[in-house]
């Protein structure tokens, strides 16, 4: 007979690029009890063929309508993989940047939340002020302000749309908390209440299913 497993915990870190999600995920993997798999955006971008890049990392703004149907499918694949890992008793940490500012609404977040109905999901908003994001972009990629001294439009769009609708189980500001402190806050929440309510609320906002492929 198949072995029955207790569902593994799922922690989804949602925020802009350079908000600190990946660093928090690394701390979770290295310090939390049990096996923690990272199935986030960086992992899936690496698996995505070059001609379909950036895959699920597609920026807000509707700049690649031709990719959007595939993006919907890729998100479904990622979340079904997350569910499969949890069913086998593996814990999962996911660093991602959800938004619905495509050329047309895609309802990806609500559909993903529906896929994880009944799973122990903690949806964590990783917040970071725009000026700190810009400092980190310059430090990491040597990519900063425009020649006119303005914040690039894609960076502004990420900041404006990644936290819509803003429903979370836990919110953390990485401009005042270290990665370790953020991980500690997540650990404490898991110890007291591993089943969050944010994903259920988001799923209830829309009952749409993934389109047939």
Image (cartoon, rainbow, N blue to C red):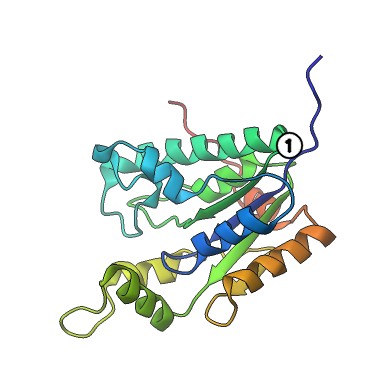
Residue at the extreme right = 192
**Residue placed at 38% from the left, 38% from the top?**
47
Q: Residues within 10 Å of mark 1 (few under 14, many from 20)?
A: some
| Residue at the spot of label 1 | 89
Q: Say whether residue 166 is left or right of residue 159.
A: right
- The structure residue drawn at horizontal position 37% and vertical position 50%, both measured from the top left corner, is 104
The residue positioned 28% from the left and 46% from the top of the image is: 65
Q: Tell me the quarter of the picture where residue 190 sits.
A: bottom right
Q: Is residue 164 visible?
A: no
- Rendered location of residue 88, percent (x, y): 71, 32
Q: Residue furthest bottom?
A: 149
Check the image and name the residue furthest to the top. 1
| Side of 179 where 34 appears, left or right | right
As drawn, 125 above or below 73: below
Residue at point 30%, 41% (across, down): 67
Where does the image place residue 201, in percent across and percent down from the top left?
A: 68, 55
Is 63 drawn above or below residue 157 in the view shown? above
Q: Position of residue 204 (x, y in %)?
A: 67, 49
């Amino acid at each position: 007979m198949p072995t029955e497993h207790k569902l593994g915990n799922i922690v989804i870190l949602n925020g802009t690029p350079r908000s600190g999600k990946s660093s928090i995920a690394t701390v979770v993997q290295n310090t939390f009890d049990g096996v923690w798999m990272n199935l986030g955006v960086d992992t899936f971008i690496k698996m995505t063929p070059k001609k379909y890049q950036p895959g699920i990392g597609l920026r807000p703004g509707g700049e690649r309508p031709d990719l959007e149907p595939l993006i919907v499918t890729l998100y479904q694949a990622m979340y079904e993989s997350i569910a499969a890992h949890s069913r086998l008793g593996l814990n999962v940490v996911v660093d991602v940047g959800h938004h619905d500012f495509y050329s047309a609404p895609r309802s990806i977040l609500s559909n993903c939340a529906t896929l994880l109905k009944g799973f122990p999901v903690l949806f964590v908003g990783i917040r970071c002020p725009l000026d700190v994001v810009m400092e980190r972009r310059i430090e990491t990629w040597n990519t900063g302000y425009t020649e006119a001294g303005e914040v690039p439009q894609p960076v502004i769009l990420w900041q404006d749309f990644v936290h819509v609708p803003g429903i979370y189980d836990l919110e953390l500001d990485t401009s005042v908390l270290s990665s370790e402190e953020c991980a500690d806050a997540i650990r404490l929440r898991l110890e007291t209440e591993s089943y969050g309510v944010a994903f259920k609320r988001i799923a209830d906002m829309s009952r749409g299913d993934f389109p047939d492929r």
